[in-house]
Image (cartoon, grey):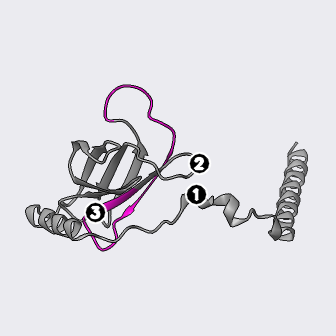
């Protein structure tokens, strides 16, 4: 019985090794099979650059940092309407353009985990389909930059929920 088991184990090992090598050979043999960059990132998505920090934004961020002390560990949430107004939670929201938002907090968030999802402020209905991206705000350690787009990649105003966790 153990001899039969050893033979089966050896056969399975060789089969896995053969398939792994064959799969790796296929991937290496066809590097031109990658999709062109335009297909992966449609031109409608535009630039991923953040707009410059305004004087108002810089003043608001500095004032928020002075008003609050440093937190050891915390989770901060904010729910933002599509027009850039804060529905609930903490933070100051600035709307820059179509689908571009900045959320300023009273503490440094550069080392935080940033999670955002498209959502509504009310308890009704499923939010519209789309995409959202979130990043630390350039030159502002206590702010987060959020962009919302349609599923086709066109910038659009969508409400969202943002969670910032500091550990």
Whether residue 54 is situated above or below residue 23 in the rendered picture: below
Between 69 and 16, the residue placed more toward the observer is 69
In this view, the residue farthest toward the top is 124
**In which quadrant of the rendered view does residue 64 lie?**
bottom left
Other-residue count near label 3 (Cα within 10 Å), few / some / many at <14 / 14–19 / ≥20? many
The part of the chain drawn in magenta is 121-146
Apparent side of residue 26 relative to residue 142 in the rendered image (left or right): right
Kindly identify the residue that appears in the image at 26 percent across and 69 percent down. Answer: 54
- In the drawing, does residue 58 fall left or right of residue 117? left
- Closer to the chain start, of discs 3 and 2, is 3
- Look at the picture and state if 82 lies above or below 138: above
Q: Report the disc number at residue 44.
A: 1
Q: Which residue is mark 3?
A: 143
Residue closer to the observer: 154 or 28: 154
Instruction: Name the mark on residue 31.
Output: none
Q: Is residue 118 left or right of residue 25?
A: left
Question: Can you give x and y, in whole percent of width and height, for residue 144 in the image?
Answer: 32, 60
| Alpha-carbon span between mark 1 and mark 2 | 8 Å
Residue 126 located within the stretch drawn in magenta: yes
Label 3 vs label 2: CA separation?
27 Å
Q: Where residue 135 sits: x, y (%)? A: 40, 62
CB under 8 Å between callouts 1 and 2?
Answer: yes
Residue 101: x and y, percent? 34, 56
**Distance between mark 1 and mark 3 Cα atoms:** 26 Å
Q: Are marks 1 and 3 in contact (CB under 8 Å)?
A: no
């Amino acid at each position: 019985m153990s001899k039969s088991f050893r033979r089966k184990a050896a056969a399975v090992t060789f089969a896995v090794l053969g398939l792994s090598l064959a799969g790796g050979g296929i991937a290496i043999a066809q590097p031109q099979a990658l999709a062109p960059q335009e297909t992966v990132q449609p031109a409608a998505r535009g630039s991923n650059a953040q707009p410059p920090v305004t004087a108002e934004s810089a003043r608001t961020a500095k004032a928020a940092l002075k008003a609050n002390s440093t937190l050891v560990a915390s989770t901060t949430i904010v729910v933002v309407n599509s027009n850039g107004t804060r529905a609930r939670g903490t933070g100051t929201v600035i709307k820059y353009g179509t689908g571009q938002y900045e959320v300023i907090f009273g503490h440094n968030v550069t080392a935080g985990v940033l999670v955002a999802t498209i959502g509504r402020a009310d308890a009704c209905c499923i939010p519209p389909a789309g995409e959202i991206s979130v990043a630390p705000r350039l030159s502002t350690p206590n702010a987060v930059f959020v962009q919302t787009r349609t599923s086709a990649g066109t910038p659009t105003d969508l409400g969202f929920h943002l969670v910032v966790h500091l550990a």
